[in-house]
Amino acid sequence: MVLTMVGIIVYRGKAYISSFAETEAGFHVRIEPVYVVNINGEELLCALRKALAVGNPRIPTPTREELSRKGPVLRATKARSMKELAKTGAAYNIAWTDKGIEVETTRLDKQGRWEFDPEKRRVFPSDTPLEKIVAVILEDIRSRPEVWQ
């Protein structure tokens, strides 16, 4: 069970951090505010702490029309589509669950869309400092120059 979740999207040399809301239907959607920071440990930590403070509010399930509109991250990045973000970006979700802290990292699927890479999924004990989680994410970002340069 997910207790809290935040996400990071890395695109064109910046990190875009947001919280998620849980819909009444049980799925999560990114919400505002989106914090835009440089890709370094200090700025990522600060933005993640702000996103965590927003929490994961419960909201009514969006209509199909609402879901088809540009979400807050697309507006913040000025990308035309999620597929454009996926081409040269990466996404990371950090979820605090009853089993620990789960970090999921994306890769491209055959259609050029994001999917979570099961080989890069990491689970940390629930008392792991946020600094360690950020260090793991930064290590992955730096291993993918196409993502952050």
Image: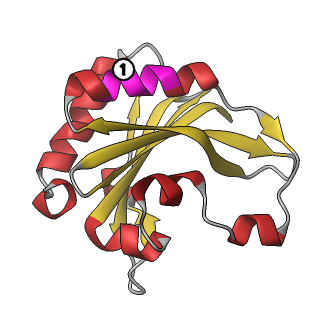
Q: Main secondary structure of the magenta part?
A: helix
Which of these two is toward me, 93 or 37? Answer: 37
Q: Secondary structure at mark 1?
A: helix
Q: Which residue is situated farthest in the bottom direction here?
A: 111
Q: Is residue 72 toward the left or the right of residue 85 in the image?
A: right
In this rendered view, identify the residue nearer to me: 73 or 128.
Answer: 73
Residue underneath mark 1: 46
Screen quadrant of the N terminus: top right
Asked if residue 45 is among those painted magenta in the image, a careful observer would answer yes
Residue at position x 27%, y 47% in the image:
14
- Left or right for 65, reference 95: right
For label 1, the crowd category at 10 Å Cα-Cα, with few meaning under 14, some 14 to 19 and many 20 or more, is few
Judge left or right: residue 58 versus residue 73: right
111 is higher (above) or lower (below) than 34: below
Extent of the magenta region: 44-50
Picture coordinates of residue 43, whole percent (x, y): 28, 26
User: Residue drawn 43% across and 76% down?
Assistant: 83
Colour convention: secondary structure
Q: Is residue 125 visible?
A: no
The amino acid sitting under disc 1 is Cys
Residue 79 appears anywhere in the view:
yes
Of 79 and 88, the residue lying toward us: 79
Seen at 15% across and 64% down, the residue is 146
Tell me the residue at 82%/58% (across/down).
62
Quadrant location of the C terminus?
A: bottom left
Residue 19 pos. (x, y %): 57, 37
Question: Looking at the picture, how far across and down is residue 72, in whole percent?
Answer: 57, 52
Q: Position of residue 143 (x, y in %)?
A: 12, 52
Whether residue 74 is in magenta: the answer is: no
